[in-house]
Image (cartoon, rainbow, N blue to C red):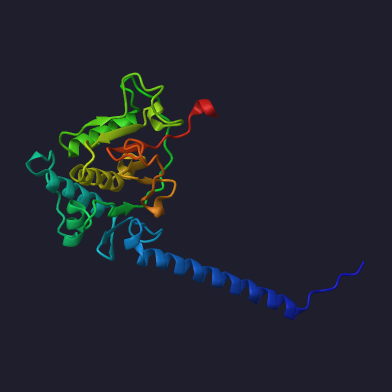
């Protein structure tokens, strides 16, 4: 059997065509990302996979913050909003633009949020058993951190001995990995307080190994960290399922050895 060699011209033609396709795809991806960034005032905040971990939208400008800046900014915003009741001192935010601090404290004009998002894709963690408190050790650490920074919080989502009913299938509440931080009744003031909490949580996600945050028809998760806050689908007539009256937060799970 004889084999006919590919003509050099045809081979180079294929290389050039493949290269051209890759260039076109790269241009489409770049234009798509640019469109998302430039039109973000009409979308929810995103954090691109490059550059600093966090971003805040101030009017039509995206301001990038590194993780430490985001943590200090969200803590300072919580302190300012709580006034004399704040359980911690306000950190130094001289390096944070005034517009960023204003939008974190007051919320975007005519809206409470979201205005800040951060990129965190999770990490490898060990599976933790639920303690008699109804929380895992990781969840207890998160609860303590919230209470250290926010006065008079109403925190639920756990019961001694743990839940075995009352939540959706596969809920992190059943494993003691979730907290609900309540802001009742549902009104604009409580909505703004809820976003102060949600922004603080997302900025501190690596510190507390947070996996998911849900509030006010929005969700953020380590599964899609660069997409930022996404729309959360729920029964439009159910304030609880839409998470309008509480911020839901759960921590990373880790692989359960019993499921191996």
- Please identify the quadrant where the N terminus is shown: bottom right
Place of residue 78 in the rendered image (x, y in percent of width and height, measured from the top left): 17, 46
Question: Which quarter of the rendered picture does the C terminus lie within?
Answer: top right
Specify the quadrant of the image occupied by residue 156: top left
Residue at x 25% of width, y 53% of height: 70
Instruction: Tell me which residue sits at (21%, 53%) in the image.
Output: 107
Q: Is residue 97 visible?
A: no
Q: Which residue of the protein is positioned furthest toward the front in this rendering?
A: 237
181, above or below 220, in the image:
above
**In this picture, is 207 found above or below 177?**
below
Residue 152: percent from left, percent from top = 16, 33
Q: Please, is residue 86 above or below residue 229 in the view?
A: above
Farthest residue to the right: give it.
Answer: 1
Residue 8, picture quadrant? bottom right
Q: Is residue 240 left or right of residue 125?
A: left
Which residue appears at 16% of the width and 49% of the height? 76
Residue placed farthest to the left in the image? Answer: 84
In the picture, measured across the screen, residue 223 lies left or right of residue 60, that is right
Find residue 22 and report its horizontal and vertical position in percent.
Answer: 57, 69
Q: Nearer the viewer, residue 224 or 258?
A: 224
């Amino acid at each position: 059997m004889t084999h006919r060699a590919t003509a050099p011209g045809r081979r180079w033609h294929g290389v050039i065509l493949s290269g051209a396709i890759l260039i076109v795809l790269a241009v489409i991806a770049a234009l798509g990302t640019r469109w998302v960034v430039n039109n973000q005032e009409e979308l929810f905040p995103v954090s691109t996979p490059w550059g600093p971990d966090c971003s805040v939208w101030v009017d039509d400008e995206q301001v990038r913050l590194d993780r430490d800046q985001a943590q200090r900014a969200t803590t300072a915003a919580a302190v300012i909003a709580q006034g004399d009741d704040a359980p911690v001192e306000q950190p130094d935010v001289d390096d944070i633009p005034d517009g960023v601090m204003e939008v974190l404290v007051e919320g975007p004009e005519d809206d409470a949020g979201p205005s800040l998002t951060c990129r965190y894709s999770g990490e490898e963690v060990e599976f933790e058993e639920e303690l008699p408190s109804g929380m895992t050790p990781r969840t207890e650490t998160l609860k303590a951190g919230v209470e250290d920074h926010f006065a008079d919080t109403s925190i639920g989502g756990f019961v001694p001995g743990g839940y075995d009913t009352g939540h959706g299938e596969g809920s992190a509440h059943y494993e003691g990995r979730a907290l609900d931080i309540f802001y009742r009744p549902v009104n604009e003031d409580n909505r703004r307080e809820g976003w102060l909490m949600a922004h603080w949580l997302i900025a501190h996600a690596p510190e507390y190994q947070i996996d998911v945050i849900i509030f006010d028809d929005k969700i953020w998760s380590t599964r899609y960290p660069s997409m930022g806050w996404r729309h959360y689908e729920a029964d439009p007539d159910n304030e609880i399922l839409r998470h309008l009256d509480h911020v839901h937060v759960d921590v990373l799970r880790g692989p359960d050895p019993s499921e191996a």
